[in-house]
Amino acid sequence: MTAPTPITLDHCLALDADDPLAGFRDRFHLPDGVIYLDGNSLGPLPAAVRTRLERVVEAEWGRDLITSWNVHDWIGLPARVGDKIARLVGAAPGSVVCADSTSVNLFKALAAALDLRPDRRVILSDSGNFPTDLYVAQGLVRLLDRGHELRLVEPEGVADALTDDVAVLMLTQVDYRTGRLHHMADLTRRAHGAGAVTLWDLSHSAGALPVDLAGAGADLAVGCGYKYLNGGPGAPAFLYVAPRLQDAVRPPLSGWMGHEAPFAFDLDYRPAGGIGRNLCGTPPVLGMTALDAALDVILDADMAQIRAKSQALCALFIDLVEQECRGHGFTLASPADPDARGSQVSFRHAQGYPVMAALIASGVIGDFRAPDLVRFGFTPLYLTFSDVWDAVAVLRGIMETRAWDAPEYHRRAAVT
C-alpha cells in the first residue's frame, strides 16, 4: 500500500478558493489572531447583531418605551423567531416557539410527553445525552412521584431498548462529547412502533446540519440558541411540538404568555391554541432580538453547502492531526465516518486539559470535556480550510515543545 499524499498549505488554500460560503466570514466579528473552533459551545458575534441591538436599545426601548410591545411587535418575537428556526430544523410554520432556556423547555416538553402516555413509566435515554437533560428528567421523576424511571443505555443500544413500557424516547441528536450522530428518522419510527413519544434535543445540530423534524415524524424537540445559531451567551432556546399534537399538549408551566388571552387577566388558566400555549413568561426582548438578527445570516446560506463544508473541514482536521501530531498521544473519539458525526471533532488525550489550555493561550480556541476530551467545533460560515492548517500547526508546536506542561495550564478554570 502506498503512503497517502501529504496535505499541504497549498491544498488548503485551493479549497478556500473554491469555497461557495467564503463570503459569509465577513458577516461575523472575529478577533484578530484567533482561530475560533468553539462555535459548537458559543457562536461568535454576527456583525448585524450589534447594529440591530443598538437600534432596539436606543429607538425602541430608549425612545418608544412600553409602546414598543405594539409599535415594534415585541410581543410577536417568540413566534417570529420560532418560525425562522423552523426553517432550519425542517418544521412547519407555527410549530416552533422561541422561549426560555433549553433546560426549561426540556422540562416542559418531557412533562407534556409523559402526559401523552399516562399508562407508561419509562423515560429512555442514552449515556451520551447531555447531562442537564438527564438531570431535568431525574428532577421531573421526583416531582411527579408516580413511579417513573429514567433508563439509560449505551447509544448503540437505543433501538433494542424500545420496549412496550417506554413512554418517551429522549435523545440528543448529536453527542456533545464525540459528535456521534443519531439517525433521527429511524429511531423515531422505531419509537412510534413501540408506542413511545419522541423528544429530541437539537442543541448540537440545529444550524450545523440538515434537520427534518417533520419528515422524521418527530413529536417534540428543543434546542439551544447560542451555539450554531450564534444568538449570543445565554440566548433564548426553542421548543417544537408537531402540529398534530399541539392541542393535546398540556403545558406544565401555565404562565400568562401561554394563556388564550393574556391581557384579559382571567383568574383561571386557558391554554392558547397551537404552539403558543408553550410560552410561559415575558419574552426577553434583547436576547431574542439578538438571536433574530443572527438567524438571518444562516438563513441566507444553503444548508447542503454548510453540511458539505462542515464534513470537509472535520475530515481535513482529522487527517492533519494524524499527519502532523502522530506519536503525541491523540486518539480519535469521534466517528471516522463523516455521515455519522455532527460538526465537531473530539480527540482523547491523557493531558487533554493542559493541552487545550495551551492551545487557547496560543489563539486556537476549542474546549475540554472531562475526563480526557479535547473538542473542536467547525462552523462553515466563518472558518476556512487554511484556519484548520494553522490550528494544527499550533497544536503540533505545543506538543513538540511540551508547552502544555507549564504549571499555569494545569490549573483548572471554572469553565472548561
Image: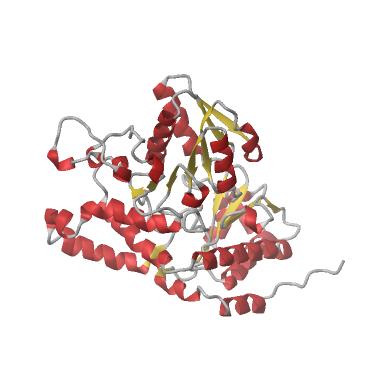
Apparent side of residue 107 relative to residue 348 in the rendered image (left or right): left
Apparent side of residue 394 relative to residue 210 in the rendered image (left or right): right
**What residue appears at the point 63 percent right and 58 percent down from the top-left corner?**
403
**What residue appears at the point 33 percent right and 46 percent down from the top-left corner?**
99
Residue 241 in sight from this viewpoint: no
Q: Where 166 sits versus 408, above or below?
A: above
Apparent side of residue 344 relative to residue 142 in the rendered image (left or right): right
For this orientation, the residue located farthest to the right is: 1
- Depth check: give the residue in front, 4 or 375: 4
Q: Give the image location of residue 276, x and y in percent.
A: 29, 44
Residue 173 in sight from this viewpoint: yes
**What residue appears at the point 40 percent right and 37 percent down from the top-left corner?**
109
The quadrant in which residue 19 appears is bottom right
- Depth check: give the residue in front, 366 or 225: 225
- Depth check: give the residue in front, 416 or 235: 235
Q: Give the image location of residue 378, x and y in percent.
A: 55, 61
Which quadrant is home to the N terminus? bottom right
Q: Give the image location of residue 390, x and y in percent.
A: 60, 70
Q: Give the image location of residue 334, x and y in percent.
A: 65, 52
